[in-house]
Amino acid sequence: MSNVLAFNGNYGGARKGSDFLQHLERRPPELWYQGKLVENVRNFEPIRNGVETLAALYDYQWSHSDRMLETFDGKKVSRSFSIPKEKSDLFALGKALLTSAKFSQGMLGREPAYLNRSIASFAGSADFFDIGGKIFSNNIKEYFRFVRDNDLSLTHTILNPRVNRRVGPAFQHDPTVAAHVTKESDSGIFVTGARLVATLPFADEIAVFPARLMDVSDASKDYAFAFVLPTNCKGLKFICRDSIDYGLGRNNHPLSARYEEMDAVALFDSAFIPWERVFCYRDIDVCNQFYDATGATAHVTYQVVCKNIVKIEFFLGLISLMIRGSGLEAFQHIHEKMAEIWAGWQAMKAFKSASEAGARLNDFGMLVPDWSPLEAARFMFPRLYPRMVEIVQQIGASGLVTLPTSEDLDGPLRDEIDKYFQSVRLEAAEKIDLYRLAWDASVSAFAGRQVLYERFFFGDPVHMATRIFRNNKCSELMERVNNFIRDNGV
């Protein structure tokens, strides 16, 4: 293995939480928060709980190893790196992804499994990276083995900052804003500029993938690349947003205090990328086919659909507890609200099953889930999720904004709280715990970030609709209706 890819850990295969934490302590990324350099990423209060949660996920995979791990070359590795060849492989992968998502109730949108599916898809379709005469297939295969065998976590970025949204990065008033190649040498390339949005910036590695639908012009070639780097590499820093974990603990903020992934802007300042870590370079055609031709779009979406199934299950359970706790079973509008979420749950499960049933081998011999049901799922969920949040708000009403804290429960007003905050079937403390969870899922800063995240997870929903419109001409259906018209309905 190239020294560039060498890993200093003394373990191989699926890792434990302590392995992740030790690596983070040895090789912390350069994070900036509220104008200051973070001196101790591992224990930095605004993200410390998120770091601990990611470490706990690595331990969780061992306690659910029957589904989440598989044996490869004599060692256990995460099944999220699977390159399926048979439908049985895909079914096993789906079970692993559902199990992984249950760890966070589907609230970790960028758990490692998400990008593991991209890297696995690229490796399973590695010959694609030799199109155009540039030989990058070995790079992706070596990197896949490196990441899988060390069970690394990745963040990634695919968006260029655009002051003017009507033109690409090369045609901005200042074309140096977006990350671009500034120099090329025998040993690699140098990149300067910004990329959006790097979620989970305390991950081990960052993948900088092509922005979709690049302008086909020579001027755009300096922006046409894909590469991977350690997050602590020289010339890379991250500017983080405000944390949504306010440090008030799990009793008060049960979701925020667990699942703060953090979002950041990645800034490159003459960052050096060795050729061994480049997947494509100055090839706009390859960049524009990067995700679909390799099956990565389908496999990533398959993981997201598994995550979304679990997320709906969480909301369905939460709302059911609120209904029962407050004795709302007799109201028909409550029935309708619950049925709405239940139908969405069944739809997502059906989309997953349909994508598995229609899975086919791609041009490179990797099994890829059927895209049409997955595209339907990713079109529907950004509309379903805000509605689920709204339903929680409607059921909880003012009860979501008049909640005592855990400190109040331990304070001198406990008797009053027990009297005035009870519900039909719940003691005050039980109701407060439930409603604080409902508040964190529907009202808090964490909840707002989740809604925004799900709305735009796959990009502009209008552009998604345009893609569906253009790629589904319905010619056969139009002909059927025309035949009906010509036959006068006979």
Image (cartoon, helix red, strand yellow):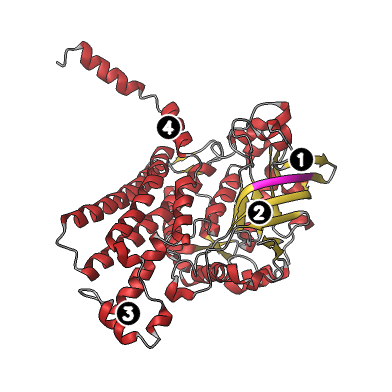
Label 2, label 4: how far apart the Cα atoms are: 30 Å
Report the residue marked by disc 4. Answer: 468
The one of 112 and 66 positioned closer to us in this rendering: 112
Q: Evaluate if marks 2 and 4 touch, with contact meaning CB atoms under 8 Å apart.
A: no
Label drawn at residue 429: 3
Report the residue marked by disc 2. Answer: 206
Q: In the figure, residue 185 lies in which quadrant?
A: top right
Q: Identify the residue at the far right of this view.
A: 186
Amino acid residing under circle 3:
Ala
Q: Earlier in the sequence, mark 3 or mark 2?
A: 2
Label 1, label 3: how far apart the Cα atoms are: 58 Å
Q: Earlier in the sequence, mark 1 or mark 2?
A: 1
Magenta part of the protein: which range? 190-195
Helix, strand or loop at label 3? It is helix
Amino acid residing under circle 4:
Ile
The vertical placement of 455 against 65, above or below, is: above
Q: Earlier in the sequence, mark 3 or mark 4?
A: 3
Q: Nearer the viewer, mark 3 or mark 4?
A: 3
Label drawn at residue 181: 1
Image side of residue 231 versus residue 190, left or right: left
Image side of residue 375 versus residue 181, left or right: left
